[in-house]
Image (cartoon, rainbow, N blue to C red):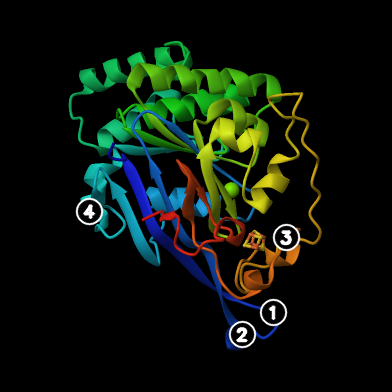
Amino acid sequence: KEPLLEIKNLQKHFVVKGGLFGRKNLQTVKAVDDVSFKVYQGETFGIVGESGCGKSTTGRLLLKLLEPTSGEVLFEGKDIAHLSQKEMRLLRKDLQIVFQDPFASLNPRMKVFEIIEEPLINFGYSDKKERSEIVHEIASKVGLSANQLKRFPHEFSGGQRQRIGIARALVTKPKIIIADEPVSALDVSIQSQVLNLLKDLQKEFGLTYVFISHDLSVVKHFCDRIGVMYLGKVVEIADRENLYTEALHPYAKALLSAVPSPHPSKKKERIILSGDVPSPSNPPSGCTFHPRCPYKMDICSTIKPELREVRPNRYVSCHLYNEVPDSGVTYE
Ligand code: SF4
Ligand code: MG
């Protein structure tokens, strides 16, 4: 099966001024460091990790809201990472984003109708009547009434504002939606309503989602496959069930140990990691997780582990699963 979206060796480096010495002390931060994964039509691919691990940057690279330093973003087999902005414009309606904070992303001076209509105008829907019909249809799909379309964003609750953000993303009938922490700003009771809405819309429109979240219990209910990120790298990719039952990468194990097991009989031990996440401007050598890893071996501080398929559909970057060199199938 061909992936709808394939990310190959994606890198995003930022140059920042470090310390007190200004320009003399420019540092390169590898926010996204050699990330590869595939997303298939109709699935929800989760990207999880702690804040600062590079998941939001990855999401923006997928949409070309940021230019990658290197690597490829293949959408339907075509590399969009290096398209001009003009060429990208044509593709933009197929790839949309829902942001964490629907209030910050909605223009306060525009009525809800205009907010949802705007992408249609941008993509050249010139027939006003047709636009109005599409807006009303999408609005009703997300649970907004015709009356509500005449109001301004500030008149709505957080959950309703996220419905507006979702309607705006959906109005161009995209193939894929990148959702960056779409429910993190909402009350827990509202979260499930918005997640259910996203699920219903996915079924109805055959949507593919990339779902970025730090919230492992949300991801557990929402995603089909999941990539775990640490310090700008993907350390494990697995089906939801496999990951939550038994994560293989030591960092993923520790992260997931905080979530109750789906099988209460298989009680997981909570793993508390020592130390903080190191600075991405000065990451540790070899496996960047080695200073905190309970399974660390000699090789770990010198040789960088590659992401490899260590079991069917299971990708892990860790020397623990590399005992026989080159016995595994590499991700490529
Ligand atoms: Fe731990 Fe080594 Fe695996 Fe890194 S490569 S996660 S340090 S065992
Ligand atoms: Mg973020």
Going 76% across and 61% down the picture, which residue do you hit? 276
* Residue position marked by numbered label 1 in the rendering: 19
Quarter the C terminus occupies: bottom left
The first of marks 1 and 3 along the sequence is: 1
Going 55% across and 33% down the picture, which residue do you hit? 240
Q: Is residue 152 left or right of residue 84?
A: right
Which amino acid does the dot numbered 1 rest on? Gly
Query: Mark 3 or mark 2: which is in front?
Result: 3
Badge 3 density bin: few <14, some 14–19, many ≥20, Cα 10 Å? some
> Among all residues in the image, which is located at the extreme bottom?
24
Quarter the N terminus occupies: top left
Badge 2 density bin: few <14, some 14–19, many ≥20, Cα 10 Å? few
Query: Mark 1 or mark 3: which is in front?
Result: 3
Query: In terms of depth relative to the viewer, which is nearer, 218 or 194?
Result: 218
Ligand 2 within 8 Å of disc 4? The answer is no
Tag 1 and tag 2, C-beta contact below 8 Å: yes
Query: In terms of depth relative to the viewer, which is nearer, 34 or 79?
Result: 34
Q: Is residue 297 left or right of residue 10?
A: right
State the separation of the CA atoms marked 3 and 4.
46 Å
